[in-house]
Image: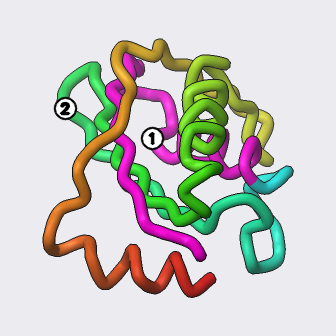
Amino acid sequence: MRQGFAHQAVLGMGPDDDPAAPGAAITTVLCGHWEHPAPCPVAPHHTRAERDGDELRLRVLFATEPDREQRVRADIDRALGGGELTGPDGRTARWRLLRSGPAEPAVEEAAHLERLARG
């Protein structure tokens, strides 16, 4: 049975780079492409990005079976460690992974995590 988890990361990213690109990179690694039919094959997920100067703070919520949690986290780190993504418009966004790791889900994220766990 799937459970909900949270992951956070901080990236160094230029002001002209697309803040949605790292989330698309995560979706590409987890689902094969940033555009795909539901459901997500490995781990239903949601990524929120917030800029703070030259840093981009990511919060990733995902649901998977507990024995696959570490694999999903490793996939997230692999996606973010790649450091770039070329979008459908041909522009390439670049970033540096500064920090990444597990996070405690916030109380206000509980309903979202439940929806992800249901698939």
Specify the quadrant that holds the N terminus: bottom right
Q: Are marks 1 and 2 in contact (CB under 8 Å)?
A: no
44 is higher (above) or lower (below) than 29? below
> Closest to the observer: 59 or 111?
111
Residue occupying image coordinates x 36% and y 52%: 6
Q: Which mark is residue 45?
A: none
Q: Earlier in the sequence, mark 1 or mark 2?
A: 1
Q: Which residues are magenta?
A: 1-30
Identify the image quadrant of residue 50: top left
Does the stretch in magenta take in 85?
Answer: no
Q: Which amino acid, mark 1?
A: Pro
> Closest to the observer: 104 or 46?
104
> Closest to the observer: 3 or 81?
3
- Disc 2 crowd, CA 10 A, few/some/many (<14, 14-19, 20+): few
Give x and y (percent) for residue 74.
60, 31
* Residue 50 located left or right of residue 97: left
Q: Which amino acid, mark 2?
A: Asp
**Pointer 2 residue:** 52
36 is higher (above) or lower (below) than 10? below
Q: Which mark is residue 19?
A: 1
Residue occupying image coordinates x 82% and y 52%: 33
Give x and y (percent) for residue 45.
55, 63
Residue occupying image coordinates x 32% and y 32%: 56
